[in-house]
């Protein structure tokens, strides 16, 4: 599959999604806000993963970047769209978050209030887009990381990215239930975002066959990164569940009971099965890491699992019935736009970087 085919597919699916979203927004605005929030949370992982892995490579190096540079940079280029795509959902802030009309016993209104919420959202947008610009236009070529003289910027950016994504996870997901708290949750959601974006990047590499000197070895390295971060995500999810279940506190247990008893409970098995069990056992088998068809299939399963996990985190917080067709339409609408921009970036990257002024960089 070539970038132009990705663009055509994105346009068709995106138009179908837009039609569904328009119909849903007209007849059931509250359901549209919920569906768009889930779509936003899912697709945001694409640029976040691209930025994260490039920054990590600046500090660690690795030959695998010769294969991953193009798709990772293209993923980072989608950040302006991905970061601003939350606006349609947050227009319906009062229908999404109960803390916009707080109960008398809610003590953290200094943090959970609309003004502070939108200020933080604006900060996330600015910080993430500055990082994306640094990743796209920074002095890097091929497999080489950034100059050692500039690597301190990457280190600071990674710390800022960790804090900002953690607070974003609290603001947009955890605050749906303002009395529930989990100190592990920001890390869990950050890992989920990374796996979502990296799975799409690796799926692209597997389908397109991005050229490199030793692509097979690079594919093995990249697949090992995916396996390691998948295990890390599963570990965090299990530890959060285990600790909360053992504590059995009345302000924490209902958060899980809602999800176990809701119509979305089957998403638990999709999330765990397709997002950890299948990838874990398949990718442990060394030959599977060299086969593009297997890697592409696993990446697609991880994307499905992360979408199911996103719906599981958000939808059980609302008592109203499900509008599954609208949930799918929102994913297709934003996904079509994201994939269209991603495919365009893949084609345009050589020209984009050619227009960037040459930097004097010493990689010795």
Image (spheres, grey):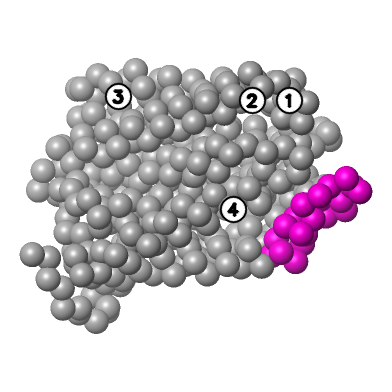
Q: Position of residue 254 (x, y in %)?
A: 76, 26
Q: Position of residue 148 (x, y in %)?
A: 19, 65
Q: Are marks 1 and 3 in contact (CB under 8 Å)?
A: no
Which quarter of the image is occupied by the C terminus?
A: bottom left
Q: Residues within 10 Å of mark 2 (few under 14, many from 20)?
A: some
- CA gap between label 2 and label 3 equals 30 Å
Residue 360 magenta-highlighted: no
Q: Is residue 11 above or below residue 200?
A: below
Is any part of residue 177 visible from this angle?
yes
Q: State yes or no: discs 2 and 1 in contact (Cβ < 8 Å).
A: yes
- The residue at which mark 2 appears reads as 244
Q: Nearer the viewer, residue 249 or 353?
A: 249
**Alpha carbons under labels 1 and 3: distance apart:** 37 Å
Residue occupying the far right of the picture: 104
Marks 1 and 4, how far apart in space? 25 Å
Nearer mark to the viewer, of 4 and 2:
2
The percent coordinates of residue 317 (x first, y second) are 76, 36
Residue at numbered disc 4: 168
Q: Which residue is mark 3?
A: 283
> Contact, CB < 8 Å: mark 4 with mark 3?
no
Q: Disc 1 or 4, which lies upstream in sequence?
A: 4
Instruction: Please name whichever residue, 282 or 239, is drawn nearer the observer in this view of the structure.
Output: 239
- N-term-proximal mark, 1 vs 3: 1
In the rendered image, residue 244, in percent from the top left (x then y), is placed at: 64, 25
Q: Is residue 308 above or below residue 135?
A: above
Instruction: Determine which residue is flagged by label 1.
Output: 249
- Magenta region: which residues? 99-118
Magenta-colored segment: predominant secondary structure: loop
């Amino acid at each position: 599959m070539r970038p132009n085919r990705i663009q055509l597919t994105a346009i068709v699916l995106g138009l179908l999604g837009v039609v569904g979203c328009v119909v849903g927004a007209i007849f059931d605005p509250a359901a549209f806000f919920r569906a768009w929030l889930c779509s936003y949370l899912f697709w945001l992982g694409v640029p976040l993963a691209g930025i994260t892995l490039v920054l990590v490579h600046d500090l660690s190096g690795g030959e695998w970047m010769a294969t991953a540079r193009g798709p990772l940079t293209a993923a980072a280029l989608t950040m302006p769209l991905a970061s601003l795509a939350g606006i349609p959902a947050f227009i319906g802030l009062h229908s999404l978050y109960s803390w916009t009309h707080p109960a008398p016993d809610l003590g953290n209104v200094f943090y959970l209030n609309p003004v502070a919420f939108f200020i933080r959202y604006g900060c996330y947008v600015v910080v993430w887009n500055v990082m994306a610009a640094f990743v796209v236009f920074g002095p890097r070529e091929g497999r080489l990381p950034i100059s050692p003289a500039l690597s301190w910027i990457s280190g600071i950016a990674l710390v800022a990215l960790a804090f900002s994504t953690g607070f974003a996870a609290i603001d947009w997901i955890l605050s749906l239930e303002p009395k529930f708290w989990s100190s592990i949750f920001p890390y869990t959601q950050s890992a989920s975002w990374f796996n979502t974006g990296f799975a799409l990047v690796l799926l692209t590499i597997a389908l397109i066959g991005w050229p490199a000197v030793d692509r097979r070895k690079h594919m093995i390295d990249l697949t090992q990164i995916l396996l390691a971060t998948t295990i890390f995500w599963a570990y965090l999810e299990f530890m959060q569940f285990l600790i909360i279940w053992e504590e059995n506190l009345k302000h924490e247990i209902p958060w899980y009971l809602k999800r176990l008893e809701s119509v979305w409970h089957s998403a638990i098995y999709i999330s765990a099965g397709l997002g950890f069990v299948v990838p874990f056992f398949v990718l442990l088998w060394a030959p599977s890491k060299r086969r593009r068809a297997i890697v592409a299939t696993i990446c697609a399963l991880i994307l499905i699992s992360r979408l199911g996990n996103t719906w599981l985190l958000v939808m059980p917080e609302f008592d109203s019935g499900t509008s599954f067709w609208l949930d799918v339409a929102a994913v297709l609408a934003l996904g079509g736009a994201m994939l269209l921009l991603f495919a365009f970036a893949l084609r345009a990257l050589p020209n984009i970087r050619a227009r960037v002024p040459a930097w004097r960089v010493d990689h010795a």
